Image (spheres, rainbow, N blue to C red):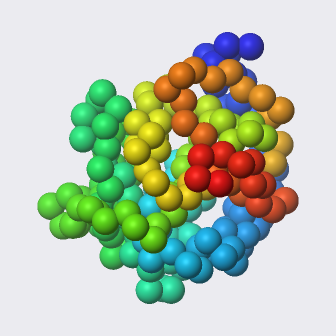
Amino acid sequence: MTKKELRITTAKERKSIADKAEKDRRIAEFLLSSEEYRAARLILCYASLPDEVSTYYIIKQALSDGKEVALPYCTDKAGNMDFYLIKNTTSLNVGTFGVREPDITKCAKAEDFSSSIALVPGLCFDVSGNRLGYGKGYYDRFLKNYASLSFGLCYNRLVKKSIPVNNYDEKVTLLITEEGIINNGGKNG
């Protein structure tokens, strides 16, 4: 199956996830109770779309826990993004591709990624940490130079045995599903 075909079938499959709210809660609990989360100063997150694993509870809890939280802002349509620190989810605007992004007139750009973890969206992942994104390469470009741990958030039924990859595709270190945390030995793992 090609990446394009897998994107189409996985997007349909993800829209039909049963008990989504409960699965989102369990994924958040696994993340928030992890040693990696507790040790991190900065959480690089994303504002989830309706059919993605919800990140809003994670964002609110991280802020409540005194963590810095930064979300991506797409700087162009060529796949480049920066992260901006947020204080709450009300400082987000609908941005590139309909994704909620920080209002960069009100948020400071994150410059120091030390002691951070990155939460990475994807349509699906495989057991080796490969990620099928939306095809624009934003996270692949970011992860290529990111030196800390990255977590793919995914529903268990969307974790595949393998997915097609190219030279520029970047793996995540760990996967978190409603069943638990999968250490795949990926980058920085």
Which one is in front, 110 or 4? 110
Q: Seen in the image, is 73 located left or right of residue 26?
A: left
Q: Is residue 90 above or below residue 61?
A: above
- Number of numbered discs on residues: 0
The C terminus lies in quadrant? bottom right
Q: Residue at x 51, y 63 (%)?
A: 117
Q: Residue at x 22, y 66 (%)?
A: 107
User: Which quarter of the figure has residue 29?
Assistant: bottom right
Which one is in front, 92 or 73? 73
Q: Is residue 169 above or below residue 37?
A: above
Q: Residue at x 37, y 63 (%)?
A: 113
Q: Is residue 165 above or below residue 27?
A: above
**At which x and y percent is residue 158?**
77, 40
**At which x and y percent is residue 89?**
39, 68
User: Which quarter of the figure has residue 181?
Assistant: bottom right
Which one is in front, 93 or 86? 86
**Can residue 11 be seen in this snapshot?**
yes
**At which x and y percent is residue 177?**
76, 55
**At which x and y percent is residue 99?**
41, 45
Q: Seen in the image, is 47 located left or right of residue 74?
A: right
The N terminus lies in quadrant? top right
**Can residue 14 be seen in this snapshot?**
no
Q: Residue at x 71, y 49 (%)?
A: 185
Q: Seen in the image, is 151 located left or right of residue 112?
A: right
